[in-house]
Amino acid sequence: MALTIQKSYNESEGKWILVLEGEVDLHTADKLKETVNQMLSEKLDDIRILGDRLDYIDSTGLSVFISALKKLQKEEKNIILANIKPSIKKLLNITGLDRIVIVE
C-alpha cells in the first residue's frame, strides 16, 4: 500500500500538522523522511501527526520519528501522535516510544 502525506503549518497553534494515510515501511519511509526534513528546515516546531488513517508503521518509519525528535528536543519541541490505531499504539508501547513522544 502507498503512503499519502498532507502537511500544513498551523500558525495559531504554532505547530506542524501532518496527516499520514496508508503504510510507512521500507518502501515509503524515505518519502516521510524527506517531508519531515523539509518541514523542520522551514520551521523547527512541534509536529502533530494525525494517525487515524495510518494503517501500519515499521521500524524504518519509527526511525524517521526518532531522528526528527532528536532535532526537535534541542529546541524543546515535540512530536504529538493523535488518533492512532490500537495496533500502532501497541508498537509504541513495546518500543518505548510512548515515553518520548506525546500520544493523545
Image (spheres, rainbow, N blue to C red):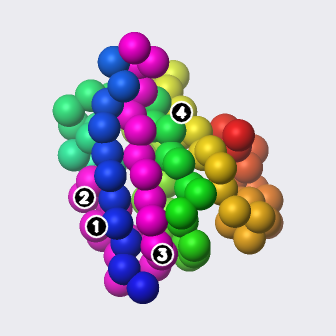
Q: Which mark is residue 48?
A: none
Report how far apart the C-alphas of labels 2 and 4 lie in the structure: 18 Å
In this picture, residue 37 sits left or right of residue 79: left
- Residue type at mark 2 is Glu
* Mark 3: secondary structure: strand
* Disc 4: which residue: 78
Residue extent of the magenta highlight:
12-35
Identify the image quadrant of residue 16.
top left
- Residue type at mark 1 is Lys
Q: Answer with mark 4 or mark 3, whichever residue precedes in sequence.
A: 3
* Disc 2: which residue: 34
Report how far apart the C-alphas of labels 1 and 4 lie in the structure: 21 Å
* Disc 1: which residue: 31
In this picture, residue 84 sits left or right of residue 73: right
Q: Residue at x 32, y 52 (%)?
A: 6
Report how far apart the C-alphas of labels 3 and 2 lie in the structure: 16 Å
In the rendered view, tell whether residue 17 sits above or below residue 96: above
Q: Which mark is residue 23?
A: 3
Q: Answer with mark 1 or mark 3, whichever residue precedes in sequence.
A: 3
So how many labels did they put on this image? 4
**In this rendering, which labeled residue sits more in front, label 1 or label 4?**
1
Please state which of residues 90 and 76 is positioned toward the viewer in this rendering.
Answer: 90
In the rendered view, tell whether residue 71 sits above or below residue 49: above
- Estimate the x, y position of residue 65 in percent, counting from the top left: 49, 54
Q: Residue at x 27, y 41 (%)?
A: 39
